[in-house]
Image: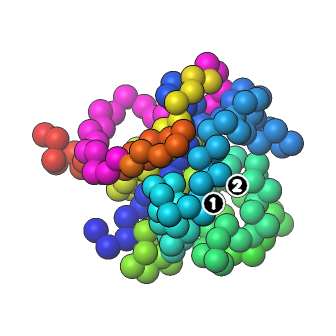
Amino acid sequence: MSNPIRLYMSMSLDGYIAGPDDRPGQELGRAGGRLFNWLDDRESDGPSGQVYREALATGAVISGRRTFELAGRWQGDHHDGVPIFVLTHHVDDGDVPPGHARFVTDVEDCARQARAAAGDRPVMVHGAGAAQALLRAGHIDEMEIHLVPVLLGEGRRLFDHLGGDHIELDLVRRLEDRDVTHLRYRVRRPEETA
């Protein structure tokens, strides 16, 4: 696949991507910042640096609306001016996202636009809501999970509202680094698991 749609997400061992009470001013929830300690090594030549550079080499971003808002809309530029497609249920009249961001209300259209905009580069996905919607629609090709050895106990889970569909994954890469294991999975298509 020349330009996979790939989820990038830091997650606790018990499945949380943010601590409890995530909101503006406390975007990662209480104790949720712990999930991102591995970014201290993002400039290194080690595995975390490699994964970080790969993330920044993506050609488009799909984000859920909640993630987009909690991130301060990234001031319209997630990285290097790539297009940001914000998957949302509705758009208020007059709500124009900044910079390179645009709102999209249809998951199929969002995936199609992001792939086209990314060219031959991967598409980065952020946010639990967007990830679940794209997975349900069959549009996530890979998942890069930054698994952090901590149990947060509560907060926002990555796959809480995925639904009852059975989804098989193939581990295609595992990179160990200080305080994190970077796991890349390929999402099997239904015809592969039948």
Where is the N terminus found, in terms of image quarters?
A: bottom left
Snapshot quadrant of residue 166: top left
Query: Is label 1 in a helix, a strand or a loop?
Result: strand
Left or right: residue 181 versus residue 130 is left
Q: What stretch is highlighted in magenta?
A: 153-174
Vertical placement of residue 76 versus 32, above or below: below
Q: How many marks?
A: 2
Query: Is-magenta flag for residue 142?
Result: no
x and y percent of residue 149 in the render?
A: 52, 30
Label placed on residue 86 = 1
Q: What type is the residue that disc 1 sits on?
A: Val
Category of crowding for the residue at label 1, using alpha-carbon neighbours closer than 10 angstroms: few (below 14), some (14–19), many (at least 20): many
Main SS, magenta residues:
loop
The residue tagged 2 is 68
Q: What type is the residue that disc 2 sits on?
A: Phe
Residue at (32% x, 51% y) in the render: 173
Residue at (71% x, 39% y) in the render: 33
Do the CB atoms of the residues marked 2 and 1 lie less than 8 Å apart? yes
Label placed on residue 166 = none
Where is the C terminus found, in terms of image quarters?
A: top left
Residue at (37% x, 64% y) in the render: 4
- Asked whether 88 or 140 is in front, the reply is 140
Snapshot quadrant of residue 193: top left
Q: Distance between the residues labelled 2 and 1?
A: 7 Å
- Asked whether 92 or 110 is in front, the reply is 110
